[in-house]
Image: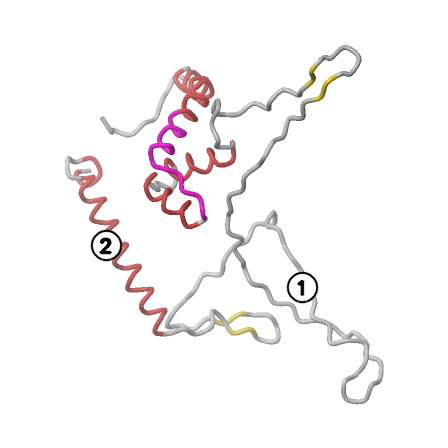
Amino acid sequence: QKQKFGASSEKIERETEQLELLLEDVEIAIAAADPSPESEEHDNGDAVVSPQRRRGRPRVSDATPRERIVLDPGEACSACGSPLRLVGEDVTEILEFIAAKLKVVETARLKKSCRHCETMVQPEAPSRPVPRGMAGPGLLAHILVSKFDDHIPLYRQNEIFARQGVEIPRSTLIDWCGQAVAVLRPLTDMIRQEVVGADLLHADDTP
């Protein structure tokens, strides 16, 4: 009870996180010293993992996109030139990461005039989540999730964007966050009304 609800509970949590980081560094050093394959595949498809180091196999969702690359030895035998026939295939998988990238979307609104009545015609500009702002909805969502869910400060996001060739000042990121929060406020107000309308609420003891 004291560890969970006492005055020093937050201090204990911080110390635990620091110990986890140190342990992680030690485990990385061990993995670097033993760069053995993750598992050994037998003919029956069973994987045997070394007892010294057990590695967890990544669990990939069925919704994850897949790309199939086929390596074909050809139609004729390289040794005698006779036709080859397919008897089977060996399939291996690697999990690849497609890095996110920034792009500039240009919207050109053509102006046209009527030669008969001299009327000027032009489509209306599409709406933006932030008025007169350059950030698109996908970029704003990424910034908010990175800050409030992944706990990545805005100055670090600035460094990440700079590596991708786009310099976004921290002051601009702050403005975008504030404006995006304002845009989402009606939704959060509706969620709050739904939550506080319940007969019972469960919350932590944070002041």
Q: Position of residue 62 (x, y in %)?
A: 61, 50
Question: In the shown orientation, is residue 102 left or right of residue 206?
Answer: right
Q: Residue at 27% across / 54% down in the picture?
A: 20
Q: Is residue 143 magenta?
A: no
Residue farthest bottom in this picture? 80
Can you identify the residue that label 2 sits on?
A: 19
> Please, what secondary structure does the residue beneath circle 1 have?
loop
> Please, what secondary structure does the residue beneath circle 2 have?
helix
Can you identify the residue that label 1 sits on?
A: 69
Give the answer, above or below, for where 175 lies relative to 100.
Answer: above
- Provide the major secondary structure of the magenta segment: helix
Give the answer, above or below, for where 95 lies relative to 107.
Answer: below
Q: Is residue 170 magenta?
A: yes
Label 1 vs label 2, nearer the camera: 1
Q: Position of residue 150 (x, y in %)?
A: 38, 41
From the viewer's side, name the closer residue of 130 and 70: 130
From the viewer's side, name the closer residue of 151 and 173: 173
Question: What amino acid type is highlighted by mark number 1?
Answer: Ile
Give the answer, above or below, for where 113 lies relative to 139.
Answer: above
Q: Residue at 22% across / 39% down in the picture?
A: 4
Give the answer, above or below, for where 198 lies relative to 46.
Answer: above
From the viewer's side, name the closer residue of 170 and 31: 170
Q: Quadrant of the N terminus?
A: top left
From the viewer's side, name the closer residue of 56 and 72: 72
Q: Position of residue 92 (x, y in %)?
A: 61, 67
User: Magenta span covers which residues?
Assistant: 165-178
Label 1 environment density (alpha carbons within 10 Å; few <14, some 14–19, many ≥20): few
Q: Position of residue 203 (x, y in %)?
A: 32, 27
Question: What amino acid type is highlighted by mark number 2?
Answer: Leu
Residue farthest right in this picture? 83
Question: In the shown orientation, is residue 184 left or right of residue 158?
Answer: right
